[in-house]
Amino acid sequence: MAKVWAIAFNTFKEAVRNRILYILLIFAIVLLLFSGLARELTISAHEKIIRSLGLGCINIFGLLIAVFVGIGLVYNELDKKTIYTIISKPIDRWQFILGKYFGLLLTIYVNILIMTLFFYFSLYWQTFMGSDALAKVYAAYPPGQAPGALHQMGYCGWSVLRSLGLTLKTLCFFPDQVTADLQIVVVMTCLELAIITAFAVLYSSFSTPTLSAILTVFTFVVGRGNEDIIRYTWYLERKGLTSTAAIVKYHGAQFVAHLAPNLKIFYSDTCNAALSNPPVIVDYYAIAYAAIYSALILSLAVLIFRRRNFK
Amino acid sequence: MAAVVETFGLTKIYTLDFLDVEHGRLKLRLGRKRRQRVALQDLSISVEQGEIFGLLGPNGAGKTTTLKILMGIIFPTRGSARILGRPLGDKWAKARLGFLPENPYFYDYLTGREFLKYYGQLYGIPRRERERKAEALLERVGLRDATHLPLKGYSKGMLQRIGLAQALLNNPEIVILDEPQSGLDPLGRKEIRDLILQLREEGKTVFFSSHILSDAELVCDRVAILYAGELRNIGRLTELLSARIKEYEIVARGVPAAILEQWRPRADRLLVEKDNAMIIVRQENEAREILSRLNEVGATLVSFNPRRETLEEYFIAQVRGGTNG
């Protein structure tokens, strides 16, 4: 496994030195920090808006990193012919694929950790700077009098420090009521992305970056809508499979639904947490599903890669 | 001596796409035969332990294809090969091999030191030894001052040198180099030549491909000549190249014009540049006579060079389908 980790860390290093990663990360952080502005768009349920926006942001940017960094993962090695010197070393081809997968997963997880950190910070910061909290500050002053600029700045700085402290405490696995459930949701996002990353590696092992990107996003969309496809087959069944077109549609939908991953199992907790619908529980079935599905997809990638000639 | 690399009827046939763009024109290939391109045909050679073996041939001869098959980068369509007695792809054999591909591209975001350490990990070399070897090799290939530079800042010559360093990381028994001198300046080519000779002195087997024949002639013990995917000839340079002297080249200063006119019919070629004359004759007695008369006619001998057949001349004769005389 030492050789797999060597390839994984090199893949991580490559991704970390890739400009596109920083562009995505900065964009995500800006969006997370300014999620507070979204509260101005609603009359109530401010917190839900911020939570939805934050979790969605982590999910989508995680996917974008998997797509943009993952698609060129194997292709670039072939295109730049760096694969020649790797394959000539005493390693197996499966070690290379596994190393690439873990390297990309490490990149995504480190980025999710950073985004989660900013998300939590944003949540705490909104708590201290929200109207209820500010009303308490103002209440300390006589009517008609507002705190001075120095006091405002001091309160602001104090809020930043407290938010940072609470964020770090939460990240050290001591969640409080603000971030309760969110930790599980982030783990579910990580599991979902483990499957998507396996697909990105699979597509990258035999096709061009553009095609890989299209196929990866397509898999994500189909995976998320898997349960809807199954519902569609029920609808077709209820209507009656009388015509050839209906039979083709039914079996086609069944085939896609069974082949594509069911990503809804990772997503339902996200919805619950975003809407503060307790309880969010650790879904062990989802963990097993992600592990087995990723292993199967990676095995397929290895099978394809083992037979490839690198011209 | 034992054979360390053996190939038995190695053949590689590429299957081309149905539809392709060639020279800006859309090309449709219908039929199985039209879609096939033979890159290598029934190659059977063996490389002995401790020798410098050159795989020579023009572009597209199948040299790189052969080396790629040996390194497990592509698979043969037919035939087999053994490296250190093991079949292709064997990890034990790979651990005793060093390989430098043609025009090497490496991870340009890594520094020279990071790159060697990473490749050391792939060989499974322990950390301390890896670091020691990386430093020693950077010193050996003359990149001591560029260890902290990312590879994207390296020149072509520097990339070739770091490529050689990675090929030597595991102290290999066999070093396989694909066109190691391609694209290098004369100084760089000489450095590679010296390194190849040095590797032989260390007891390593060097198997390299090249189309720079003058360089190959200086270092190779044995050569194989490939042309259009087929083996044209294989053997020791001393056996392949004619031992007899092909012609005698005499350069003299101050030979009177009238004398030169007398010698012109006897000479194979006669060139006059200002006061210097170059006379090339095929027969030894002709050369002796000209040399003996130089004093008489008041001329000075500048140089006398008996010329044997070069590898380049032999190679051209081979690829044109001729035989060596």
Image: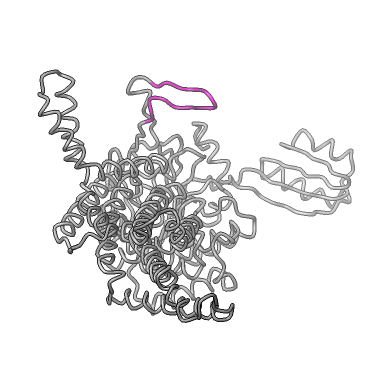
Q: Is residue A103 located in the magenta-colored stretch of the structure?
A: no
Picture residue at 40% right of the left edge, 74% below the top: B130
Picture residue at 14% right of the left edge, 18% below the top: A243
A157 or B103, which is in the foreground? Answer: A157
A228 or B47, which is in the foreground? Answer: A228
Highlighted range, magenta = B16-29
Residue A308 lies in quadrant: top left
Q: Position of residue A292 (x, y in %)?
A: 17, 54
The answer to whether residue A25 is above or below residue B60 is below
B319 or B77, which is in the foreground? Answer: B77
Picture residue at 65% right of the left edge, 43% below the top: B247
- Residue B1 seen in render: no
Q: Is residue B23 located in the magenta-colored stretch of the structure?
A: yes
Q: Position of residue B314 (x, y in %)?
A: 54, 41
B293 or A180, which is in the foreground? Answer: A180
Q: Position of residue A237 (x, y in %)?
A: 10, 29
Describe residue B55's horizontal placement relative to residue B193 as left or right.
left
Describe residue B45's horizontal placement relative to residue B136 as left or right.
left
Residue B51 lies in quadrant: bottom left
The answer to whether residue A21 is above or below residue B33 is below
